[in-house]
Image: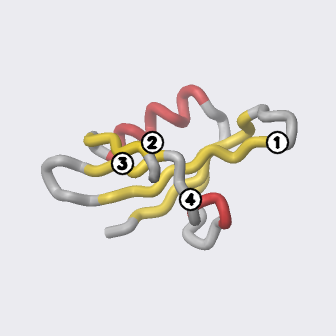
Amino acid sequence: MPTVIKRDPTRFLREMKVHYGDVWKMPSSKYLLQPDFLVVDPKTGKKTRVSFVSLDDGEVVGVVYDDLG
């Protein structure tokens, strides 16, 4: 079960771009099958799946996301 964050998804992703250089929208990514976060906008109900992409040694190299609607 992913962690649910009640926040504006656009702002959340903008802040992720500050800390991680690579943030991609990839709807068909295998990393989004079990996302790390589910960001829910409390005003509109818009949901966005967010996952970290990491190497075998655990180093995070990027973030992928997709809107659920």
Q: Nearer the viewer, mark 3 or mark 4?
A: 4
> Disc 3 vs disc 2: Cβ atoms closer than 8 Å?
yes
Q: Nearer the viewer, mark 1 or mark 4?
A: 4
Amino acid type of the residue tagged 4 in the rendering: Gln
Residue at image location 13% in from the left, 50% down from the top: 43
Residue behind mark 4: 34
Residue 13 bears which disc, if any?
A: 2
- Disc 4 crowd rating (10 Å Cα; few below 14, some 14-19, many 20+) is few
Amino acid type of the residue tagged 2 in the rendering: Leu
Q: Secondary structure at mark 2?
A: helix
Residue 7: x %, y % from top left: 27, 40
Residue 37 shown left or right of residue 60 in the figure:
left
When the figure is inspected, residue 34 is found, relative to residue 52, above or below; the finding is: below
Say which of 24 and 4 sits in front. 4
Mark 3 or mark 2: name the one nearer the start of the chain.
2
Q: Quadrant of the C terminus?
A: bottom left
Between the residue at mark 2 and the residue at mark 4, the CA separation in whole angstroms equals: 18 Å
Residue 5, picture quadrant? top left
Mark 2 or mark 4: name the one nearer the start of the chain.
2
Residue behind mark 3: 39
